[in-house]
Image: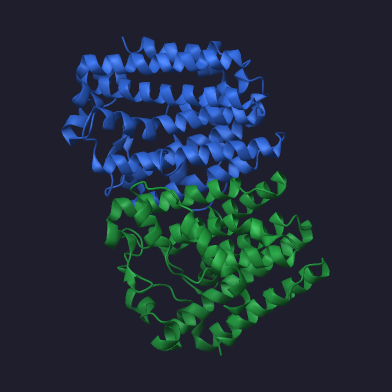
Chain colours: A blue, B green
Amino acid sequence: MRALAEYLPQIEAAIQGAPGTDHPLAGAMAYALEGGKRLRPGLLLLAADACGADWQALVPAAAAIECIHVYSLVHDDLPAMDDDDLRRGRPTVHRAYGEATAILVGDGLLTLAFDLLAGIDGVAPRAVLGAIREIASGAGIGDGMVGGQVLDLDGAQDAPGSIRVARAKTGALLGAAAAAGGQLASAAPAAVNALRSYGRALGVAFQIRDDLLDVVGTEAEIGKRLRKDADKERPNIVRFLGVEGARAAYDEHAQHARDALMRAAGDGVKTERLLALMEELADRMH
Amino acid sequence: MRALAEYLPQIEAAIQGAPGTDHPLAGAMAYALEGGKRLRPGLLLLAADACGADWQALVPAAAAIECIHVYSLVHDDLPAMDDDDLRRGRPTVHRAYGEATAILVGDGLLTLAFDLLAGIDGVAPRAVLGAIREIASGAGIGDGMVGGQVLDLDGAQDAPGSIRVARAKTGALLGAAAAAGGQLASAAPAAVNALRSYGRALGVAFQIRDDLLDVVGTEAEIGKRLRKDADKERPNIVRFLGVEGARAAYDEHAQHARDALMRAAGDGVKTERLLALMEELADRMH
């Protein structure tokens, strides 16, 4: 994403430096962390930057939210969950390192994330705690990412159900990334709330786009095997809404995201690049 | 443990109230959290109390560290790890609720722990961040609990190796519990360090005691099936050290714990009940 390009070198450096030790899990953790768009850490830094923070001090928080995203992928891929053999074109962690190691890689990444967050320097401790709460809540049970996984285990039964899964599984952590950026910038509560709404809507739109591309995209466009949802009988949003219905739902959530940015702008957030990120996703839709 | 009895009612209330919502994972999480000695949360509150803190404000932190302990049990019991069918005399979480749910219960408990920690009120934010770092580090990779699990996967090869596993798997989180209590009490760094050393030594002694009882205890004494280490060919410390060697190692670590308490007392910590907890464990040894 062009809107995030400025942050990527430092995000990569922080992620590669994060595990840092020579303990036996380091290789498998580094393998799990390789690749990916770094959307969540980029969004956190972009939101903090848009609120006027010195984003360079916040790179460990960005690495932390990527650790949480990657742990969720590692655990989701496990045989007892989605049972996937490939991720980003390579063997999944449990295929490459064994199932026990994959469980521990996930546990280790999730724990490391909070160690990184709590260790942020040069930010008011109260702001750091606010960011930790945002992220733990977005990643957690209930309406958070783990809660979304639980809903997904049962499988969505209808269109509202499939949107609910997307909101918890994808929207919650993106909302937390944007809101945590605001928290770390010590932004006003109204601005943090608007950023959270923006991130959540962006996340749902992103998931709808992913599901649409799975159905109507070409492999070259998205760089992974298509129709794996249908192959695996996964609840793809398009199954319930149809292609046109999914496009309408995408537009609706993209509009929610733009509306939230309008509110954030009213609270002094510089929203140009957050909007650009949204429109970049939209460009790839149509 | 008598030394912890004062804290148990509030710990139980906090643990039972913690998941709090009616989401689909709540039942399995509550099942996982039932029972247990509550040694880690009790130790956290005892350490904070010994440093002069108002421990009642810290009960959510105590519940948090129990969530971390219980998540580790749930994941350790999984088929890909120790493959245990029973825990505390009842079916393990994956036997009762399925493997996917057990993975998510563990993930949810670990995430919830940091939400609870970051949400502590009435304590200086910097002290809360210090406690979060203690706990994330004690629970994490490297020398922490996840690191210990990784060592344990490979199996200890000799006596020092089996002590190293105990130090990381059991000692690190008990050390973090005691140190986090000190951090939350805004104790001096030297007192926090002494409490961490005490908790670590206590944890190793506790693990040696557990391994000894597995070999020489009676079922009535410890209330679980004995010799399951030998049955499963797990690396029991006694296998490498012999019964007398293990007793000597126990005494050595118990003495480390007492020495650490002497240092803590020198820094103004009221160590009587921390010592009593240590001696209670010793009473059950001989």
Judge from the rendering whether residue B62 lies leftward or rightward of residue B213; answer left or right: right
Q: Nearer the viewer, residue B245 or B223?
A: B223
Q: Nearer the viewer, residue B100 or B27?
A: B27
x%, y% of residue B40?
56, 65
Q: Residue at x 49, y 34 (%)?
A: A66
Q: Picture quarter containing residue B58?
A: bottom right
| Residue B52 in view | yes
Relative vertical location of residue A12 with respect to residue A283 in this rendering, above or below? below
Judge from the rendering whether residue A235 lies leftward or rightward of residue B37; answer left or right: left
| Residue A77 in view | no
Relative vertical location of residue A136 with respect to residue A194 in this rendering, above or below? below
Relative vertical location of residue B177 with respect to residue B232 in this rendering, above or below? above
Judge from the rendering whether residue B247 lies leftward or rightward of residue B269; answer left or right: left
Judge from the rendering whether residue A235 lies leftward or rightward of residue A39; answer left or right: left
Please state the total of marks drawn on the protein image.
Answer: 0
> Is the C terminus of chain A in the top left, top right, bottom left or bottom right quadrant?
top left
Q: Picture quarter containing residue B3?
A: bottom right
x%, y% of residue A155?
24, 39
Q: Residue at x 51, y 81 (%)?
A: B241
Q: Nearer the viewer, residue B57 or A177?
A: B57
x%, y% of residue B206?
55, 75
Q: Picture quarter containing residue B72?
A: bottom left
Relative vertical location of residue B248 with respect to residue A184 in this rendering, above or below? below
x%, y% of residue A7?
56, 22
Q: Residue at x 61, y 61 (%)?
A: B177
